[in-house]
């Protein structure tokens, strides 16, 4: 069985303290994705919320996480792989979700910059849309429609 592949991206607007995230998941069953956002949120919590949502209800197996966030590639990677101390005290609820989801899995972290015609570019567009929707409508999580997912380039 091949590894589950995740692409995750977040977007945060500091002036309004609003954030949005999006993720894509490619499993043996196919492609899925979701986007969400919240008001009064920090950039770190936005990233953690998106990653926690991406990892929720994953089938068993190894996971490859594609990200461009220094938070994911730095702090989260180091804590999950045991290369750093325990997670920071802030956002412990989301840290617990991420650690539980990755417990007893092989996790690989891959730097995936946002470049045109890639899954990261698709996720970036949805993260910005989610951020803007959260700003006007408040917290939400919504699946990305299947017809939109069918247009993702670079998979």
Image: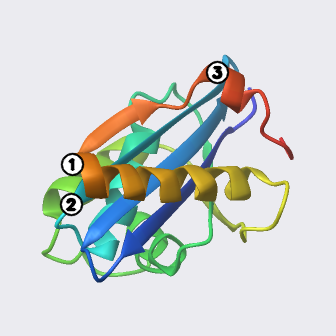
Q: Secondary structure at mark 3?
A: helix
Q: Where in the figure is residue 54, as x and y percent of width and height?
A: 46, 42
| Colour theme | rainbow
Q: Which residue is mark 2?
A: 39
Q: Which residue is mark 3?
A: 146
Residue 27: in sight, yes or no?
Answer: no
Residue 60 or residue 135, whichever sits in front = 135
Q: Secondary structure at mark 2?
A: strand
Q: Secondary structure at mark 1?
A: loop
Q: What distance separates the C-alpha of mark 2 from that of mark 3? A: 27 Å
Q: Residue furthest top?
A: 29
Displayed quadrant of residue 18: bottom left
**Circle nearer the N terminus (1, 2):** 2
Circles 1, 2 touching at the beta carbon (< 8 Å): yes
Please state, as top left, top right, bottom left or bottom right, where the N terminus lies in the image. Answer: top right
Displayed quadrant of residue 31: top right
Residue 5: in sight, yes or no?
Answer: yes
Q: Where in the figure is residue 81, as x and y percent of width and height?
A: 47, 67
Q: What distance separates the C-alpha of mark 3 from that of mark 1? A: 24 Å
Q: Where in the figure is residue 148, as x and y percent of width and height?
A: 68, 30
Instruction: State whether residue 29 is above or below residue 132.
Output: above
Please state, as top left, top right, bottom left or bottom right, where the C terminus lies in the image. Answer: top right
Q: Which residue is mark 1?
A: 138
At x 51% / y 25%, what residue is drawn?
59
Q: Is residue 80 left or right of residue 42?
A: right
Residue 153 or residue 134, whichever sits in front = 134
At x 55% / y 49%, what residue is drawn?
126
């Amino acid at each position: 069985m091949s590894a589950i592949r995740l692409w995750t991206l977040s977007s945060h607007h500091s002036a309004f303290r609003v954030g949005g995230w999006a993720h894509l998941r490619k499993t043996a069953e196919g492609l899925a994705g979701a986007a969400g956002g919240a008001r009064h949120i920090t950039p770190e919590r936005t990233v953690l919320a998106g990653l926690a949502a991406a990892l929720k209800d994953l089938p068993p197996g190894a996971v490859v996480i594609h990200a461009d966030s220094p938070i994911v590639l730095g702090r989260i990677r180091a804590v999950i792989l045991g290369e750093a101390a325990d997670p920071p005290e802030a956002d412990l609820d989301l840290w617990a979700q991420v650690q539980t989801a990755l417990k007893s899995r092989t996790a690989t972290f891959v730097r995936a910059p946002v470049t045109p015609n890639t899954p990261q570019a698709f996720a970036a567009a949805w993260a910005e849309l989610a951020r803007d929707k959260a700003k006007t409508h408040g917290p939400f999580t919504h699946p990305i429609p299947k017809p939109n997912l069918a247009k993702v380039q670079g998979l």
